[in-house]
Image (cartoon, rainbow, N blue to C red):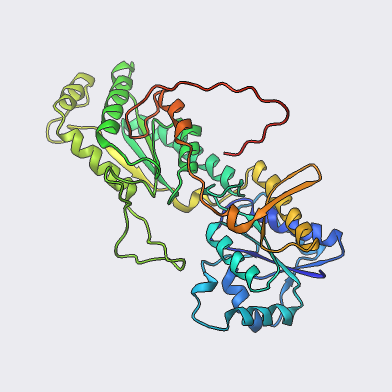
Amino acid sequence: MKKIGIITSGGDCAGLNAVVKGVGLTAASHGMSTYVIPNGYAGIYNLVEFDSLTELSPARLDIVNVSLAGSEAGHSRVKISRIKDPHKYDRIKEGLKKHGIDGLVISGGDDTGSVIVDLAQNGINCIHAPKTMDLDLNSYSVGGDSTINRIGTFVQDLKTTGRTHNRIIVVEVFGRYAGHTAFRGGVGGGADAVLIPEIPVNFDVLYSHMRDVYWMRILGSDVRAGTYSIVVAEGMKNSNGEELYDENSGVDSFGHKKLAGAGRYVVQELTKRMKADPRIIKYMKQSGMYVEGLYEAPEIRTVQPGHLVRAGGSSAYDVNYGMEAGMAAVELLKAGYSGYSVVDVKGTHIRFQKTEELIKQRYVDLDQIRFYENMNMCFGRPITEVTPVFEEVHGQVDRIY
């Protein structure tokens, strides 16, 4: 193992530059060279056409800023198995041979991981450093903590404009199948309600909670001011269990339909119920807000921070995990492993798992949500009382989100 190629793939997020730097520094400590293969899987497919690659020399590594989100190696959303070229894996091997690359470190999520499985099965040495802000892999994945912190900050900040105008604010965030970041970011920002893909939304339950909490704040305020915050994962399901697709946008390169409109749908459903509720005009008059024909009900606004939750800076946790994941990936390659994913590093122990096992989707624990429901956070379903199960543990305890 003399030369390592590094690829980052799928959606961008925080912590990836820490992976890149961890790979480069560890490889250098073993006398190996690291080269950036740009543009994700598009880059590795076209590698045979490249005249040269950028080496992560000590001087080049020195300017890789681990505290910045995004990736110095670049991304693309390309799934190798969907490329029609029947000789695609031979073409990739030819490109690797041309540049003398002996093994790959690839950082990405479940879609990226599925390609790693294919590459390993076709005789290409590769190790996976888990990356997805959705946190839906079986291990922690770089980017999750930073995204949760970003969501929490946006939710908290939007309360200032919400309270000033007595608005109800709906914040739509990423989360196609799993609601980890919406859930944890909503908790972190003090949201009143969180809607996640794992729980089809009962809008009557959500509306009742919103009405009662919102008006309690307005009517209890000495300046008649209040707001109500809802965090919505883009993959939220309506009461029929259906996702909300943008039928005009087609699918992405991995075959996923493009989701759209969860935030707008929530606004629509709540507005419909508000207009049909005779108590609203009474509360508006009681609070001094009512103006006939102009201001007869509170305003509900939706906000989509979109890629801002991926952008900017990396949390210290993601930098630590990213550096260790990059280091561990190099050590696994050096030891002769391929087709595995880094789980974590404990002391000098590198824990790893077959990539096809690690990329199986992990969903929000709905039992854990019940504790938050009993603390008056709404998840769009009726509250059930929790009976705690007590268990004493001994020794060091691992925890991921």
Q: Position of residue 273 (x, y in %)?
A: 19, 35
In which image quadrant can residue 380 be found? top left
**Residue nearest the viewer, comparing 83 with 275:** 83
Q: Position of residue 341 (x, y in %)?
A: 66, 56
Q: Position of residue 23 (x, y in %)?
A: 75, 59
Residue at image position (23%, 21%) is 287
Res 14 seen here: yes
Judge left or right: residue 222 versus residue 73: left
Q: Position of residue 43 (x, y in %)?
A: 61, 74
Residue at image position (60%, 39%) is 400
Judge left or right: residue 190 versus residue 382: right
Residue at image position (32%, 19%) is 223
Picture quarter with the N terminus: bottom right
Picture quarter with the C terminus: top right
Residue at image position (39%, 45%) is 197
In which image quadrant can residue 110 be found? bottom right
Res 108 seen here: no
Looking at the rendered structure, the number of numbered marks drawn on it comes to 0
**Residue nearest the viewer, comparing 312 with 182:** 182
In the image, residue 102 above or below residue 150: below
In the image, residue 299 above or below residue 20: above
